[in-house]
């Protein structure tokens, strides 16, 4: 097909009339109406209007649109009015068909904000797309191709990629250095950088000072959340904007607003009881999520009150120093490696791992290696075939049944048996050598960090984030703990609290014991319930049975009558559901406690624990 200028087609179609890209690229820093920061003399604004390329559409974008979208968008009654004409000749469609589909697609592009085009946002499930999400995230290769088309890519020039950290913290009064030099162009072109402040707290007057080398400094005068955007230009095309959330604190984090109560005898203002305050729901949910993710149980009311006035960062730092957190981590590793029941370590050096982890006396990979080197793991996985298979699968994520991995499995088994063998380009001749070599592989860090991210976020980690994390972990094993801390404090973890998750079985049982009996279960109690859960395809009914059994055990610490119904109801909602009751709920529950002798605190507790809301966190 003869190549036709994209610009000539757009003008012919009446989409654009005049388009120009003029001037040399320079760094700019816009801040929502504030004057741009000083730029080198001779600065000329770079036009942002994008000209999509017809040939790139035909060769790269159109096949993807026909593959993903034509099922719903190929007839006159097409959803949303977007019509893709069917390709009668898949290899050599007519120029008329290509132009018609190009024109239809242009209506879903925004030439001045291409990254926000409906073509892209709908493909990720936004803007009320009836077909839902076509791509799971922005890293999907097909989505990247469509984004490049929207940004004006051609076969000879693809748009650059702006890269910033997702989240940073700073203190008011101290400048924050911003670095955009990780941004890159796939064609190797030089880049110009443009910075902007796209969101700020009400009343704040932030300033950005940018240089032309990809660096900038942010100055803020008020605590809160600022969103910084970097876009880069290669003299022809703009990148999509890379956004970074900057949290500015006065000192050590932003605390929830608190209204002080009356003066105490020492002249200081006292805080009202937690249940009387107007609480921030997101803060309550975040406290509960940290406890379930890190301690495998819900927080007690006193713990909620303790942490509510602290920042999220302070809470993360404090919890990761507690032995109870690492005890739960240790139990998760034993469960992962199936060191259960008679294979579960009962004494010896392994028992001290939680304490040593809490005190940072041992790194996370060394702790995992101790478990794998233990007699308990050896007894659980006897013989060369079982031991080598489990270590490769659980520590590297290797699928040993695949043909490409049979040589690795064979070499590992020979080394286990004491034969001098080369594995992953390293020579060894013992079981200990095999374990040492496996743990020295970069894939160990990759597999461990993928697991950790998914445990915290319930999503797959972004490949770029994973690559950077693996590089840090390989260079220094102590980075595992640093990454653990950073991810817990990160924007992805904090924002995910908006979406409810289902409590896994073991944290659910441990939470029941804490919420009803004010203690965690013994291993024997947990084992019995775990086995009952595993025996059922749908464990939901046994969850309710378990709660009823604990309620009727006579071991709970519940009052026979609520002396202060308002306080009791509010505290149970905060403790069990991580929220305060709505006015309607408060009226119904308090009224029932006051007026109906059959409604006791035990009934209120069971009503909340048996609710669908309690199943999540």
Image (tube, rainbow, N blue to C red):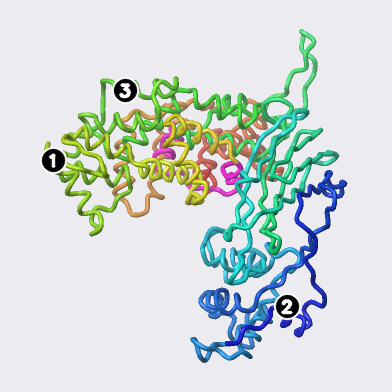
Residue at the top extreme, as displayed: 266
Single out the mark in the foreground, 3 or 2: 2
Residue 506 covered by magenta stretch? yes
Q: Which residue is mark 3?
A: 351
The reply, left or right, for residue 602 in relation to residue 333 is right
Secondary structure category for the residue under label 3: helix
Secondary structure category for the residue under label 2: helix
Disc 3 from disc 2: Cα separation: 70 Å
Most foreground residue, 42 or 568: 42
Does the image show residue 342?
A: no
User: Label for residue 110?
Assistant: none
Instruction: Locate the N terminus and report the quarter of the image it occupies.
Output: bottom right
Q: Are marks 3 and 1 in contact (CB under 8 Å)?
A: no
Most foreground residue, 58 or 520: 58
Q: Position of residue 148 (x, y in %)?
A: 61, 66
Specify start and end residues of the magenta stretch as a single range: 491-513
Dot 2 surroundings within 10 Å: few (below 14), some, or many (20 or more)?
A: some
Single out the mark in the foreground, 3 or 1: 1
- Count up the numbered dots: 3
User: Label for residue 383?
Assistant: 1
Secondary structure category for the residue under label 1: loop
Depicted 343 relative to depicted 14: above or below = above
What residue is shown at x 83% (from left), y 49% (from top)? Answer: 32
Single out the mark in the foreground, 1 or 2: 2
Q: Which residue is mark 2?
A: 7
Depicted 338 relative to depicted 277: above or below = below
Indicate the quadrant where residue 94 lies. Answer: bottom right
Dot 1 surroundings within 10 Å: few (below 14), some, or many (20 or more)?
A: few
* Magenta region, main secondary structure: helix
Q: Are marks 1 and 2 in contact (CB under 8 Å)?
A: no
């Amino acid at each position: 097909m003869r190549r036709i200028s994209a610009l000539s087609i757009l003008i012919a179609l009446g989409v654009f009339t005049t388009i120009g890209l003029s001037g040399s690229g320079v760094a700019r820093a816009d801040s929502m109406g504030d004057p741009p920061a000083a730029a080198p003399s001779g600065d000329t604004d770079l036009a942002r209007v994008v000209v999509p390329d017809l040939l790139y559409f035909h060769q790269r974008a159109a096949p993807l649109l026909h593959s993903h979208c034509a099922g719903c968008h190929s007839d006159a009654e097409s959803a949303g009015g977007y019509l893709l004409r069917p390709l009668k000749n898949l290899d050599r469609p007519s120029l008329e068909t290509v132009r018609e589909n190009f024109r239809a697609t242009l209506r879903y592009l925004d030439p001045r904000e291409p990254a926000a085009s409906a073509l892209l946002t709908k493909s990720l499930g936004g803007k009320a797309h009836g077909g839902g999400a076509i791509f799971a995230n922005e890293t999907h290769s097909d989505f990247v191709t469509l984004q490049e088309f929207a940004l004006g890519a051609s076969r000879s020039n693809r748009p650059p990629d702006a890269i910033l950290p997702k989240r940073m913290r700073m203190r008011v009064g101290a400048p924050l250095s911003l670095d955009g030099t990780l941004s890159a162009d796939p064609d190797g072109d030089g880049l110009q950088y443009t910075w902007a402040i796209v969101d700020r707290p009400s009343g704040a007057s932030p300033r950005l000072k940018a240089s032309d080398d990809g660096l900038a400094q942010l100055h803020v005068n008020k605590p809160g959340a600022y969103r910084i955007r970097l876009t880069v230009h290669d003299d022809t095309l703009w990148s999509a904007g890379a956004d970074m959330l900057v949290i500015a604190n006065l000192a050590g984090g932003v605390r929830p607003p608190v209204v002080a109560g009356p003066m105490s005898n020492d002249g200081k203002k006292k805080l009202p009881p937690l249940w009387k305050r107007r609480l921030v729901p997101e803060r309550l949910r975040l406290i509960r999520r940290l406890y379930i993710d890190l301690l495998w149980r819900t927080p007690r009311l006193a713990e909620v009150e303790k942490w509510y006035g602290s920042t999220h960062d302070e809470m993360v730092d404090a919890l990761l120093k507690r032995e109870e957190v690492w005890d739960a981590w240790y139990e998760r590793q034993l469960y992962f490696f199936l060191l259960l029941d008679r294979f579960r370590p009962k004494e010896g050096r392994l028992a001290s791992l939680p304490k040593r982890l809490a005190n940072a006396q041992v790194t996370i990979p060394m702790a995992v290696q101790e478990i794998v080197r233990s007699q308990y793991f050896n007894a659980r996985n006897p013989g060369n075939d079982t031991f080598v298979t489990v270590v490769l699968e659980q520590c590297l994520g290797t699928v040993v049944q695949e043909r490409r991995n049979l040589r690795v499995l064979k070499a590992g088994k020979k080394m286990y048996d004491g034969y001098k063998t080369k594995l992953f380009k390293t020579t060894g001749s013992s079981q200990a050598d095999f374990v040492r070599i496996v743990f020295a592989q970069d894939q160990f860090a990759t597999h461990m960090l993928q697991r950790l991210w998914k445990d915290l976020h319930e999503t797959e980690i972004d490949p770029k984030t994973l690559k950077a994390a693996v590089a840090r972990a390989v260079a220094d094993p102590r980075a595992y703990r640093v990454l653990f801390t950073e991810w817990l404090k990160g924007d992805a973890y904090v924002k995910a609290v908006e979406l409810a998750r289902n409590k896994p079985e073991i944290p659910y049982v441990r939470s029941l014991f804490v919420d009803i009996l004010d203690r965690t279960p013994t291993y024997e109690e947990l084992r019995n319930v775990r086995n009952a859960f595993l025996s059922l395809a749908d464990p939901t009914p046994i969850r309710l049975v378990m709660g009823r059994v604990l309620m009727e055990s006579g071991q709970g610490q519940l009052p026979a009558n609520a002396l202060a119904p308002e306080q009791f109801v509010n505290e149970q909602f905060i403790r069990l559901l991580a929220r305060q009751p709505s006015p309607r709920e408060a009226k119904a529950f308090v009224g029932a406690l006051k007026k109906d002798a059959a409604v006791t605190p035990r009934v209120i507790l069971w009503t909340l624990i048996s609710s669908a809301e309690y199943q999540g966190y």
